[in-house]
Image (spheres, grey):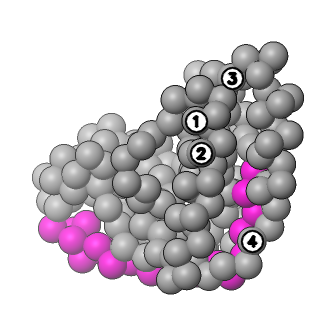
Amino acid sequence: MRLFIGTFVQSTEIIERYHQFQNLTNNCFTGKWVEDANLHFTFHFLGDVSDEKFPELYEHLKQYLVEYEEKLIIKSIEGFPNINKPRQLVGKIFSPSKEIFKLHSTFGKILQNYNIEYDKFNYRPHLTLIRIKSLSENYAEKLDSFRYFDFGEILKYRVDLIQSTLTPKGPIYKSL
């Protein structure tokens, strides 16, 4: 099964600000906006994990699959791979206490013990907002005015092991 470790963002404030950002920038690009229920940030993408490996891996992870009280600020827009020719736009997540980075490191060590490949780049927590298909001519100028858009903050979040099933209409996520 295709898995990742992540957190769904279910804050009414953040979802309202997300809709506001969509409305303010809808003439800058076309693409697929992430559905409200699917807004999430990822600690690690695990890829396909065999049914045989899953139970033991889950046992090692479950003590960390809980709610955390930590202030996270979602502010600032970034483009991937870069802002000049983005394929995605994301909202950057700031962690004043840095606990989110410790969790990321802990999960990496567990995955390493199970020989699960994971991204070893510097962790940059973010919410994917839109996967871009095309850009308008003036997108850069317009987007620059929203570079520091404030989506809000959350004071606690839950970490889940999430199954991702790809379909022609988009991914279907299920917390395990």
- C-alpha span from label 1 to label 4: 23 Å
Q: What amino acid is labelled 1 in the image?
A: Gln
Q: What amino acid is labelled 2 in the image?
A: Lys
- C-alpha span from label 2 to label 4: 19 Å
| Residue under numbered circle 4 | 68
The stretch in magenta equals 141-160
The reply to whether residue 23 is visible in this rendering is no
Mark 2 lies on a secondary structure that is helix
Residue located at (30% from left, 49% from top): 80
- C-alpha span from label 3 to label 2: 16 Å
| Residue under numbered circle 3 | 49
Residue located at (48% from left, 69% from top): 93
Q: Earlier in the sequence, mark 4 or mark 3?
A: 3
Q: What amino acid is labelled 3 in the image?
A: Val
Disc assigned to residue 112: 1
Please report contact status of discs 1 and 3: CB closer than 8 Å, yes or no. no
Q: What amino acid is labelled 4 in the image?
A: Tyr
